Image: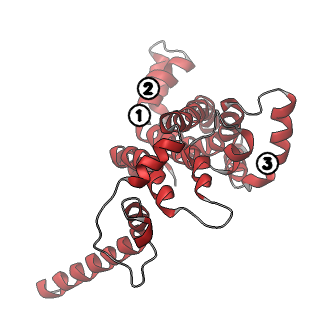
Amino acid sequence: MSARSAAATIAIERGLLCLALLFFLAPAAWLFAIAYEPARDIFNFPPRFVFEPTLDNFRTIFGYFDVARLVLSSLTISLGATTLSLLLGVPAGYALARSTWRYAPLGAYFFLAVRMVPPVATLIPFYLEMRDIALLGTYWAVILLDTVLNSAFVIWMMYSYFRSLPKELEEAALADGCTQIGAFLRVALPLVVPGLIASALFCIILSWNDFLFPAFLTNAATKPLSVALLSAYGTKDITWGTMGALSHFLILPIVAIALLLNRYFVTGLTRGIH
């Protein structure tokens, strides 16, 4: 391939990449833009790309919502579910990876199948269960349900990651006097940090963006940001400006975390799942 052909190929690839990014980012850009746009200009046709920015929508949400509490609720649910999912999923994935049982791989895929169950199918039985044990309306109701679903993915992913590690490393640690738990904590676990971070980021994103379970299992004091967005829907119209302003607090934190841990996330997915 000549240098000119190679340059043309690169230019086409980059152009297609820019078009794909534009396609996927346009809705988010529009949502962010209407947060600063006066209500009278949001539905102008043709749309106006130049307007006088306003912070009225942010004043509105701070007047109607306790934004700090909503953010705290989202963080509590996301971090709580992620912590429990890792505490359960990582050891289980390691146990399956080191098991000599011939059906261990099927066990790992069974947990993946659990994650594929439609969430709405588990809502009613779990709602009744949380009601019976007096957890309905608390953070724990959502944390426990998210943990059940997210830990299934963690088990499957960490099973693949631990399986890719040479057993000889742990056998050497055992020969030096380590226990099986010591070999897991001191040898195997430090080698799968990218997989841990990828699993944690996956759990955080799913729990942070979850709407269905918090909408039914929390109350006014424990609802997260994802449920508060529903307040933008009125009986006759949708207050798009309010939704755009509130979306800043829902989207920006998780995007910041994803960008910060992106390198580990990609490494964890590409090396762990095969």
Of 143 and 211, nearer the camera is: 211
Residue reaching furthest top?
A: 177
Sequence-first tag of 1 and 3: 3
Crowding at dot 2, Cα within 10 Å, few <14 / some 14-19 / many 20+, comes out as some
Query: Vertically, is 78 above or below 87?
Result: below
What is the C-alpha distance between the residues marked 1 and 3?
35 Å
What is the C-alpha distance between the residues marked 3 and 2?
38 Å
Q: Quadrant of residue 207?
A: top right
Residue 68 image position (x, y, % from top left) = 48, 35
- The residue that label 1 is drawn on is 191
Query: Vertically, is 233 above or below 262?
Result: below
Q: How many marks?
A: 3
Crowding at dot 1, Cα within 10 Å, few <14 / some 14-19 / many 20+, comes out as some
Of 78 and 72, nearer the camera is: 72
Which disc number belongs to residue 187? 2
- The residue that label 3 is drawn on is 122
Q: What residue type is labelled 1?
A: Leu
Residue drawn at (62%, 48%) of the image: 227
Q: Which amino acid does label 2 sit on?
A: Val
Residue 127 image position (x, y, % from top left) = 81, 41
Residue contact at pointers 2 and 1, CB within 8 angstroms: yes
Q: Which amino acid does label 3 sit on?
A: Thr
Secondary structure at badge 2 equals helix
Residue 46 image position (x, y, % from top left) = 39, 85
Of 63 and 101, nearer the camera is: 63
Residue drawn at (84%, 27%) of the image: 133
Secondary structure at badge 3 equals helix
